[in-house]
Image (spheres, helix red, strand yellow):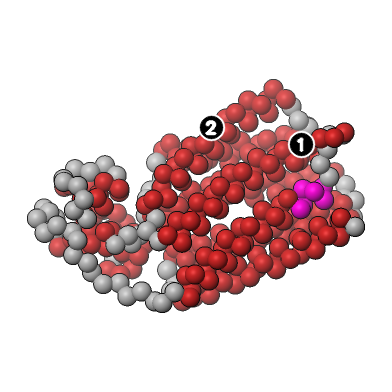
Amino acid sequence: MLDHIFLFIYIFTVGVTFAVVSLSLLYWLRSRDSGRFNTFLFIVYLAILLLLTGVRFYWEELLAGGRGVIIGTGLAEFAGYALLLYFLPATVNHIIGRRWTVLKMSASITACTVYFSLGTVYLLTGFLKPISLAAGFIYFLALMVILVDIVRSVPLIHRGSTRATVLLMTLLTVTFLPLVMAGRLLGDTVGSWAISHSIRVLFMSLYYFWMALIGIVFYIREMSSSAEVITPIHTVPEDLPITDREREIAESLAQGLTYGEIAENLGISPNTVRNHVANLYKKLSVRSKVELIGVLRGERPY
């Protein structure tokens, strides 16, 4: 009986998730910029992971697939979830128009590699306590760097709905991924700690359901809001030692636009925008985007 209920929840979640895929596609088609397209690809990626969960459950439980099927679907699952630890911070970087730093790139790659390696070792040899505990500690440190960076970056996101969506999706994911690994490990135990495959499918369905619900709320709010006309604002102090082009970019930054949006509005490349912003950093003696925006809005001296 419970398996039928869990299956219904999974099917319902698939429907909700593909509703978000459709909304994301429509949102991109309204304004075909790279940021919306990258977000659409991210939503499609989540939908594929959800379908993989159902395929693995069908092969392993209903068809009683052999060890080769279990290892193959398990590796695909761990690889897919590991890449989330790259896509999430990469999405945040794109939204706020920021490049990777060595530390943040290293943390993301480390978290991806360790998560996939732990899953691979578990599938092939079982749980090796000393190695797994050491790797788990490294994974936790890398995950904390990613989480702290995203939380600190959230205030740089101009739109409130985008800010809330990024934060909620991040918190759900960094909580979910360790639990997926724990569920896999406990799935092979016996006694009161054992977790059935059906329970794990239910848990993953709930994760995707909440992710999809966040996406639906976000897209409905964005698509129902009236179209905004971007007009220059004159909060940038007139006495700043910058060129006319740098002033145009500065005014756009003060409005909270991303590098991609600025490039599209001015008909230049994002790399050109980044070069102008780098010049603004030097001329105004600032070290971060927060400090730069503070100077541009007249909230702090340069």
* Residue 124 among those drawn in magenta: no
Q: Is residue 113 left or right of residue 27?
A: right
Q: Residue furthest left?
A: 239
The residue at 42%/60% (across/down) is 160
> Label 2, label 1: how many angstroms apart (C-alpha)?
21 Å
Q: Is residue 100 left or right of residue 37?
A: left
Q: Is residue 229 left or right of residue 159?
A: left
User: Is 66 above or below relative to 143?
Assistant: below
Q: Are marks 2 and 1 in contact (CB under 8 Å)?
A: no
The residue at 26%/42% (across/down) is 287
Q: Is residue 142 left or right of residue 235?
A: right
Quadrant containing the N terminus is bottom right
Q: In terms of secondary structure, what is the magenta stretch mainly?
A: helix
Question: In the picture, residue 217 is in which quadrant?
Answer: bottom right
Question: Amino acid under label 2?
Answer: Leu
Residue designated by label 1: 185
Question: Amino acid under label 1?
Answer: Leu
Tell me, yes or no, if residue 301 can be seen here: yes
x then y, percent, for residue 213: 61, 62
x then y, percent, for residue 17: 65, 65
Crowding at label 2, few (<14), some or many (≥20) Cα neighbours within 10 Å? some
Residue closer to the observer: 199 or 132: 199
Number of callouts = 2
Badge 2 marks a residue whose secondary structure is helix
- Say whether disc 2 or disc 1 marks the residue closer to the N-terminus: 2
Residue designated by label 2: 141
Q: Write down the region rendered in magenta.
A: 197-202
